[in-house]
Amino acid sequence: MGNTRIQQILLALAGIVTVVLLFEFGDTKILVKENGETPMSSAHSNGSINNAMTFEKLLSLASENLSKEQKDSVALLSQLADGASKKDKPGASRKLAQLWARTQNLIVSAHYLEDAARLDSNKNNWRDAADYYYIGMENTGDSSARVFAAIHSFECYANVFRFDSTDQNVRVLQAMCYINGLGNIMSGVTILKEVEQKDPDNELMNVTLGRLAIVSGQLDKAIPRLERTIKLYPSNVEAYFHLGEAYRAKGRKQDAIKMFEKCKALEKSPSFQQQLDTYINQIKNS
């Protein structure tokens, strides 16, 4: 997966949870077992993750907000998918997923992408399902739906990793399923530290750890990590933004303004530029 898609996912995030993190754990454990089983799937199967949400309930809730035209379209495509031949079922599931995505019900959409991946198992199909669950997780306001999406996103990413064990970005996104989806900070950071050992220059991992360090007040760890990240990846808008936040918290006003101005030059979103102007004016007037 390219960095462009990574950034699109990150821009969709609703925000990071406030946590206190200890980043020096020493040796870390591998969280994907040799038999392919993950701690997420194990915990889910034995009931230690308590989640009241089921797909049937999620589907029912999502259907309540559809227009009559949308409901008719869903019903028609569902009938076609149910009656499709084995060969045609993956394509029918993807069409149903596309329809649900157009209604902004990304977790429901992800379920049908997961169905397609089970029928036609390859890296790209599992990746699509995992990404849709992930973005849906970050944008839902329902805590049970968030847990449901986190579990399924993690497990779909595990299937992606089985096809390509070199893709460390997948492991970072699994870490965020733990942190943002389940509030399981220790397991998430353990994965991030594992990625750091294998790929210390990984862009997504460094931005994520830098951001978490800021949230936990560890500015002296966040600043050098993010400074190094922007040297390696000078177009990473998020790295500049969080480095600006860290500088601001340390009282380095001019450095913070410089980072936010760099964000404005890289990111053309009017709403984001307006937010940056607000930050800059606050710093100048403080």
Image: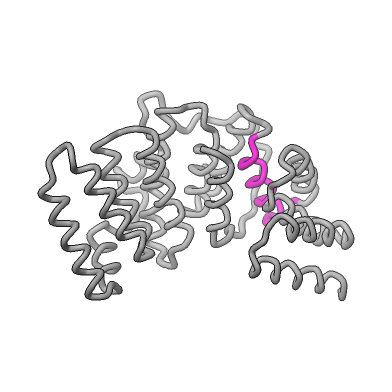
Q: Is residue 1 above or below residue 215?
A: above
Residue range corresponding to the magenta coloring: 202-218
Residue at 65%, 51% in the rendered image: 212
Q: Is 194 in front, or is 8?
A: 8
Residue 194 position in % (x across, y down): 58, 32
Residue 232 position in % (x across, y down): 74, 37
Main secondary-structure element of the magenta-colored stretch: helix
Residue 242's quadrant in the figure?
bottom right
Report the side of 185 relative to 103 (left or right). right
Report the side of 274 relative to 134 (left or right). right
Q: Is residue 73 above or below residue 96?
A: below
Q: Is residue 57 above or below residue 35?
A: below
Residue at 77%, 52% in the rendered image: 219
Label tally: 0
Residue at 65%, 68% in the rendered image: 270
Q: Is residue 204 magenta?
A: yes
Q: Is residue 57 magenta?
A: no
Q: Is 4 in front, or is 40?
A: 4
Residue 227 position in % (x across, y down): 79, 44
Q: Quadrant of the C terminus?
A: bottom right
Residue 229 position in % (x across, y down): 73, 41
Residue at 24%, 42% in the rendered image: 90
